[in-house]
Every structure is written in C-alpha cells, then in structure tokens.
Amino acid sequence: MIFPDLPGAYQYIVNKDLPTLGVLRTLYRLDNTTFTHGRTNIKDEILPAFSEILAATKVQDETWERADGTFITKYDWSTFIRELDFHGIYGDNFGSWYIRPGRDYFNGNHLKQELTVHRESATGDAVELNVVHGSHYQVSSSATFPQGKLWGPWLWYLVSPGPYLYFDCLITDIELLNRIPAQKKMQQTELSKNSQLGLILGSITVTTSREVSYLAHSFYRMVVLLQVHQYSWVTTTPTFQL
C-alpha cells in the first residue's frame, strides 16, 4: 500500500501456495558506498568493510578472524526480534528502514532471535533483511504454512535527499522514534478496513504484581517453539496490553 505523502510502502504477505521452507523474508542489497551504517535496537555503527572480510580468515559460517584476533560475523547484528523497534541501513542523508507496529505473526517465543542487517561477504553489498519467518535460533528448520497465513503489515520507510526528506539519517534515532507512534496508529486505522487484516488487530489487558513474561497464541495446543500456523503475542511488564 502506497500513499502519496509517504516515502515508503506498507507491505504484507498472505500465503497462497508456499512450499515447506525454513525462512521467509525480503532482502534488499543496497549500494555499499551510500548505505554505510547499520542500526537495530541494540547496535548502531558502521558496517564492516568488505576489504576487511577479504583480508580475514574464514573460521566458520559467515565468521572471519582478523589478523589481530578479532572477528567479523553477520550474527553480531542479530537481536531479539520482538524487542526490535526499527532497523535498517543508512548513510549521509539516506536511509532504508523497517518499522513493525505488530509482531504477532513471528514464529518462536519471546526469546526468538533473528538476523537484521549485515555486510554481504561475497559481494560487499549492504544487506537489509526483513525476516518474517526465520530458522535462526530456537525454532524448527522447516515449516508448512496454512492457506491464508498473514505476515505483516509493516512499513518499509525509504529516505533520500530532496523534497521528500523527512529527517537527516544521522539523527534518525530521535526523529524516527518520534514518528513511530503516529505510523502505528495510521497503519492500524487504514489497514483494519481490510477485513482479513482487521482480524488480528485487537487487545488483551492483564495486571500482575511482579515482572514476568506472558505469551498468548491463537492456535489451540500449539507447541510454542513450532508456532507457525497462527499468531502469538508476548510482553514483559507488571501491567501491559497486548
């Protein structure tokens, strides 16, 4: 879904005839001279240089050892997927971002981790991942999805110089975080008009006296770590709303 005043697009995936697979994702390979930095909720820094990877010794899957004994690995950019506020890659006045108002379509539980961004080891591309069903960390390596399974919606937010520049990516943490609540509200308002998307927009309120993690899912007797068929909600706080 594209709006004339928004530099990006609301996206979602509906299963029509997917095969059994381990990973469902979108992947952008962006120019490595323009998009130089990566950002998650726990990491915001320059991506490793391609020349460093070429000069290093590969020791295991997507992991290289530098001459000084330090390591380069794309798994450094992993994070707990349900705690991720937004992520992407950016440079001077350029940025490509994913913002997810909801996380109910993810597999696994509150400890599920996934890849987000990294430097492609074969080509040097700056890579931005949107893993909506992943097999890295704590899940089955393959899954069969039911007809009509919905992933999303999320916002792909693309920023570049010109009349549609909303913020300077060098100060993106402040500017973008300020925009997220408005984007979430607009997305729920607009997309809930779609009858299928509207089915997953609801709330549950629980109050407790101590901090614990709660998980609710919509598939009866589903094993949490194998949750792929329906939707789940999780949070950790004394008083919360799902």
Image (tube, rainbow, N blue to C red):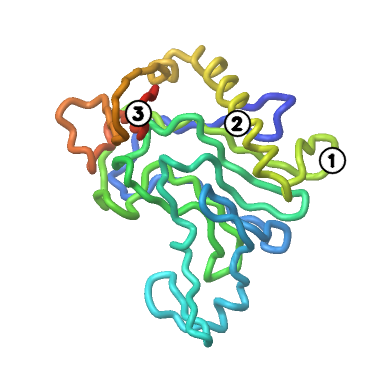
- Of mark 3 and mark 1, the one earlier in the sequence is 1
- How far across and down, in percent of the image, does residue 110 sit? 33, 41
Could you tell me residue 59's position as x and y percent? 40, 80
| Relative to 47, residue 188 above or below | above
- Residue 68 picture location, percent across and down: 53, 86
Disc ID at residue 86: none
| SS of the residue under disc 2 | helix
Residue kind at label 2, given as amino acid type: Ile
Nearer to me, 36 or 126: 36
26 or 140: nearer the eye? 140
**Residue assigned mark 3:** 238
Which residue sits furthest right?
Answer: 163
Residue found at x 47% / y 80%: 65
The answer to whether residue 146 of the structure is visible from this angle is no
Q: CA distance from mark 2 to mark 1?
A: 22 Å
In the picture of the structure, the residue carrying the numbered disc 1 is 162
Q: Quadrant of the N terminus?
A: top right
Asked whether the residues under the numbered discs 3 and 1 touch, taking CB atoms below 8 Å apart as contact, a structural biologist would say: no
Q: Quadrant of residue 144?
A: top left
Q: Is residue 37 above or below residue 204?
A: below
Q: Earlier in the sequence, mark 2 or mark 1?
A: 1
Location of residue 156 in the rendering, given as x and y in whole percent from the top left corner: 59, 38
Alpha carbons under labels 3 and 1: distance apart: 45 Å
Task: Kindly identify the residue that appears in the image at 44 percent across and 62 percent down.
Answer: 75
Is residue 233 visible from the viewing direction of this image?
yes
Q: Residues within 10 Å of mark 2 (few under 14, many from 20)?
A: some
Q: From this view, report whether residue 123 is shown above or below residue 193.
A: below
Q: CA distance from mark 2 to mark 3?
A: 24 Å
